[in-house]
Image (cartoon, rainbow, N blue to C red):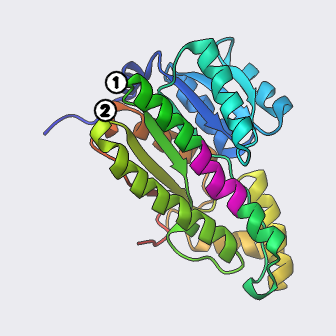
Amino acid sequence: MSDSPSPGKLAADLAGKRAIVTGAGTGIGRAIAAALARHGVRVAVADLDRDRAAESAAALGPEALAVAIDVRNRASVEAAFAEVLGRWGGLDILAANAGVSTMNRAVDLTDAEWDFNFDVNARGVFLTNQIAARHFLATGTKGVIVNTASLAAKVGAPLLAHYSASKFAVLGWTQALARELAPAGIRVNAVCPGFVRTSMQTREVEWEARLRGVTSERVVADYIAQTPLGRLEEPEDVAELVVFLASDGARFMTGQGVNVTGGVYTT
């Protein structure tokens, strides 16, 4: 039986690689960027808010880049990739993490809510993945793509039907793209986090409390009660899985939606 990859082995696998992480100004994306950088990866911190991107990049050290990106807009995505490629001459890893949520009962959803979630969560993954894949294929790079899906991509979430639908789309896209790119040695996987303690979750807790007519404390307690490991998930819990999927330790994994939920039941 082969040995499990140690932190040192992961660092050796990843040292010198170049990565773009979208939505990396805050939350899970920021944790992913930091975790990759700790393993020797040069990271481009890409975010809609350039100031937040710059703040995150500064914390990673002088080799990190801050890049403005609107993942909904093809021209913006192409410009961000061109900026990174122009600086580094190539790319090895894409962590397509940028995402949004709103919350409402399905019967009350507006077209704007539906479109906002799909534009960022699904179209954003499509655009960034496609442009990264084109680069990998054109240069013969055996690159890695890791998309951020969700627990809600495995189990439809009440009050988040539109968000769930957009994240189910991420998983379907991930599986299909992985099969198309496998002959070129390009791996595509997704991570499926659970109840992660972020500013996005803070907003969701307030929305859910209002829609359910309960306190915010009750909502958080319900999240923890659903999690067998007994606590809210931290962004770093997701980030370490992304590092593994980007490394040679996951060299025979592609097309997967990997749960990192603290044991919340999913299929």
Q: Which residue lies furthest to the left in this view?
A: 1
Q: Which amino acid does label 1 sit on?
A: Lys
- In the rendered view, tell whether residue 109 sits above or below residue 79: below
181 or 206: nearer the viewer: 181
Q: Which residue is drawn at 60% across and 31% down?
A: 20
Q: Which residue is drawn at 47% across and 15% down?
A: 16
Where is residue 242 drawn, in percent x and y?
49, 41
Chief secondary structure of the magenta span? helix
Which residue is labeled 1 in the image? 9
User: Callout 1: few (<14), some (14-19), or many (20+) C-alpha neighbours within 10 Å?
Assistant: some
Q: Which residue is drawn at 77% across and 62% down?
A: 116
Find residue 29 and report its image quarter.
top right
Q: Quadrant of the C terminus?
A: bottom left
74 or 226: nearer the viewer: 74
Where does the magenta region start and end? 118-127
- In the rendered view, tell whether residue 54 sits above or below residue 214: above
Compute the Cα span from label 1 to label 2.
6 Å
Q: Are the two marked residues, 1 and 2, in contact with CB atoms closer than 8 angstroms?
A: yes
Where is residue 147 drawn, in percent x and y?
53, 48
Query: Tag 1's secondary structure?
Result: helix
Q: Residue at x 21, y 34 (%)?
A: 3
- In the rendered view, tell whether residue 145 sits above or below residue 101: above
Which residue is labeled 2 in the image? 5
Q: Which amino acid does label 2 sit on?
A: Pro
Q: Is residue 196 visible?
A: no
